[in-house]
Amino acid sequence: MRTKKSAAPAKPQTSELVEAIKMLASEKSISEEMLFSTVEDALKKAYQKNLPNGVLVPSPNNITATIDRMTGEVHVYTRRLIVEEIETPTADQITLEEARKIKDSYQMGDIVETDVTPRGFLRVAAQTAKGVIVQRLREAERGRVYDEYIDKENEILTAIVRRVDTKGNAFVDLMGRTEGILEAGEMIPGEVLTEEDHVKVYVLEVQRAQATGTRGPQVRVSRIHPNLVKRLFEMEVPEIAAGDVTIKAIAREAGSRTKMAVHSNELQIDPVGSCVGQRGSRVDRVVNELKGEKIDIIKWSDDPAEFIANALNPANVRAVYTEASGARSCIVVVPDNQLSLAIGKEGQNARLAAKLTGWKIDIKSQTQYMEQMAGEELPEEAPAMDAFADFSGESFGGIDLPVDEDDTL
């Protein structure tokens, strides 16, 4: 007599919905449980939205949607509180009499949970899940882009101009992952950008999509920020990249002129020469990227008078007098024929020198200063000044400051 073998219990089949969620979670490194919970929340809203007209809608807190993690079976439940009397029609309450028609053991104050899964709701669940999955994919991609570019704030990137709007704002492609905005006010004055132009940009700020109201993270970039100059020199000058030469300060009027103070702790390394390069090759590459912007590279000094004298390059400085009170204010004396050069066109040279050093600079010609000292133009309450620093015949920033015999103080 043959013995009939009992069949092994069938393994539950995994639905396409569950497989899709698990596959997405694995490929995009997203939590499976988070995806299931998100789809279940969406199903709650779908249930409320698809109730027939005239049917009372339960509050969201009293609706539960579940997806079986193995079979993908979907159920919707409502919760109702047992009360003595329902004064206002609501889907969140039920009388004790009605509750005991469902189950005799119910008592006042109990919660009645009812399976209200509509017929054919699995199809609704599949459509809802598809929409949620697509949305989550987009959010995950935006999150990855944000995480990638937030680390690039204050860095320099190569961008490709894709379009320029009617307001003059340029939208640029940043390494193919996302789009950045170069606002009109962040462009170099006089610079005209056209589609497919390749430019270096400085990353000002990266904002999440929620903060900007846009579809993805917004990356704001600049062509006028002083740190763009700094990053360009870091790329061009190995001594800066290695830390042998340090950029101490930058003052910039984009599109016109920049002053940059550099320093080296290594006596054998000329910081100015390192930045200029052989026959000006290094500084020329930066100037070309900035569309011809003039760049003065000067030697930084911890002696304020020396630093101020260097900052007024290309003018020759005869002396610097600093206030005895300790205020960051000084008088600079230059040869008569150097006064306009020291001040610069529309005051630019003096303005940039003041910004670079952080000192208020009053520039006087040698004659003006001598007349003041003689009392001809001396104000009633002239500030007390320290002994001046004399730069006659010295050399600073790699630039000789010659002295004419008839031009000394």
Image (cartoon, helix red, strand yellow):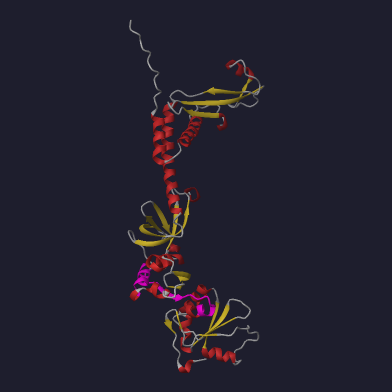
Q: Is residue 279 above or below residue 317?
A: above
Q: Residue at x 44, y 55 (%)?
A: 219
Question: x and y percent of residue 190 in the render?
Answer: 39, 68
Q: Residue at x 56, y 85 (%)?
A: 388
Left or right of 381? Residue 182 is: left
195, 133: nearer the viewer: 133
286, 233: nearer the viewer: 233
Does residue 263 show up magenta in the picture?
Answer: no
Question: x and y percent of residue 43 in the render?
Answer: 48, 31
Looking at the image, the residue that sits furthest to the bottom is: 406
Q: Is residue 260 above or below residue 171?
A: below
Q: Residue at x 47, y 24 (%)?
A: 118
Q: Residue at x 53, y 25 (%)?
A: 77
Q: Quadrant of residue 326?
A: bottom right
Does residue 302 show up magenta in the picture?
Answer: yes
> Image quadrant for the N terminus?
top left
Q: Quadrant of residue 80?
A: top right
Question: x and y percent of residue 46 in the render?
Answer: 48, 31
Which range is magenta? 280-308
